[in-house]
Amino acid sequence: MFRDSAKIIVDDNDAPSASYISNVRMEDLIEKLKILNYDNEFVQELKMKPINRHYFVIPTNPGEQFYLFSSLAAWLVRKAGKNFEQPQESDDPNATIALILDHVKEIAAVEFPPNKLKQGVGEHAIYVLDNLADQAIKVSKFKWKKAEIPADEPDQEPEIEDDEAELILEKVEEEMMADYDDEDDDILHIDDITKLYGKTMEDVQKPDNILESQTDAEEWKLELERVLPQLKVTIKTDSRDWRSHLEQMKQLRANISTGLNGTKNQLDKLHTDIGNTLDKIKMREMYLNKQLEPTLNEFRVLQEELLKIKEHYRDVSGGVTERTRTLNKLTDELEQVKKEMDERGSSMTDGTPLINIKKTITKLKSEIAEMNVRVGVLEYTLMCTKIRDRAQMQEDMNNTTNTLIIK
């Protein structure tokens, strides 16, 4: 069981670990995928990108993450023994999400809208993959076993036969350290040096048996010659020991010295050949420069003359350009004059203007006749108005007269 305590959904938003539940579920999902042989069957066979333990928690590339989410979900569905075709990048995301949720609803409850899975990341995507992984593990009949912790056994070092005639340097050092531990009083400390040198040689007491040896020198030499072939000192070399490095440096220096003798002669010969070749090249350069100097001077003079000619041509071509522009302008004016003359000549021989004048006169006459009719109408209207006003005034005067007579 993967971290059962982490599977409890904390509804309290004030909990310190509420924001990290997705990370814990993602780590559990990675472990379940490893149980399902995810590295070989999904990554290698389908040539997919391997995911890390926070891949579906942090949004980085929505398109890539959604494609990997849908591919992984399809693979888990197939591991659970159901048919699910491998999604393609060109497929409709809504259709793919709907197919995935159909399989998830058979396993667990889905209480979120499908558009939460369009990004391919977040707690809902991890929830879907986690439930599909649980179903795949159940179908594969995977069972947990108790962990068997092996008992700690002391490291058995190979037994080394002790040879009394063989002296091991480490053993000698250990015995010396043991002797120093047993006889702490006989150790000379730094603090005692000043005291020791402060004493005179007369105050130092030494045992008499050390001052005068009782051993026969001949017997000691014979005993030494007898046991000398049996004495062997084994020194364990350490790669970090400066002595081995010193010997190695000496050997390398000897090799360099040996190889340098033959190489130095070849390098000297090569240096001499290169020097001779450089001298030959220098002499040939001097010879070529001497032979080509008159030609180079002539070429230099011709190049200066060419520059002068180009400058003179530039000045002359500037005047020609200006004259060409003036000629074009005069040609345009001449063409305009010719065009005007042609128009005037054609108009003098053509009767079109006379016809136009006659049409215009006829039109003016008709307009004058219309204006006369309008003037006549206006005069008649004005005359009728004057007569009516005069009759009205006469009638008013008669009525006034009659009124006065009656009074």
Image (cartoon, rainbow, N blue to C red):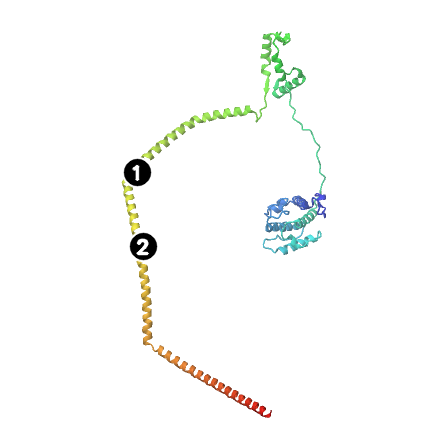
- Separation of marks 2 and 1 at Cα, in angstroms: 41 Å
Q: Residue at x 28, y 37 (%)?
A: 290
Q: Residue 172 lies in what quarter of the image?
A: top right
Q: Amino acid at mark 2?
A: Gly
| Residue 184 visible somewhere in the drawing | yes
User: As drawn, which residue projects farthest toward the front?
Assistant: 407
Q: Position of residue 40 (x, y in %)?
A: 62, 45
- Horizontal and vertical percent position of residue 315: 30, 52
**Residue hosting label 1:** 289
Left or right of 312 on screen, residue 139: right
Pick the residue in front: 390 or 42: 390
Pick the front one: 262 or 273: 273
In the image, 21 versus 241, the foreground residue is 21
Q: Residue 63, image x and y in percent?
A: 59, 51
For the point 48% across and 25% down, the residue is 253
Q: How many marks?
A: 2
Q: Which residue is mark 2?
A: 318
Residue 161, percent from left and from top: 64, 21
- Against 81, residue 146 (above or below) is above
Pick the quarter of the image with the N terminus.
Answer: top right
Q: Secondary structure at mark 1?
A: helix
**Circle 2: element type:** helix
Q: Residues within 10 Å of mark 2 (few under 14, many from 20)?
A: few
**Residue 189 visible (yes or no):** no
- Disc marking residue 101: none
Q: Nearer the viewer, residue 228 or 127?
A: 127
Q: Dot 1, crowdedness within 10 Å: few (<14), some or many (≥20)?
A: few
| Quadrant position of the C terminus in the picture | bottom right
Q: Amino acid at mark 1?
A: Asn
> Which one is earlier in the sequence, the residue at label 2 or at label 1?
1
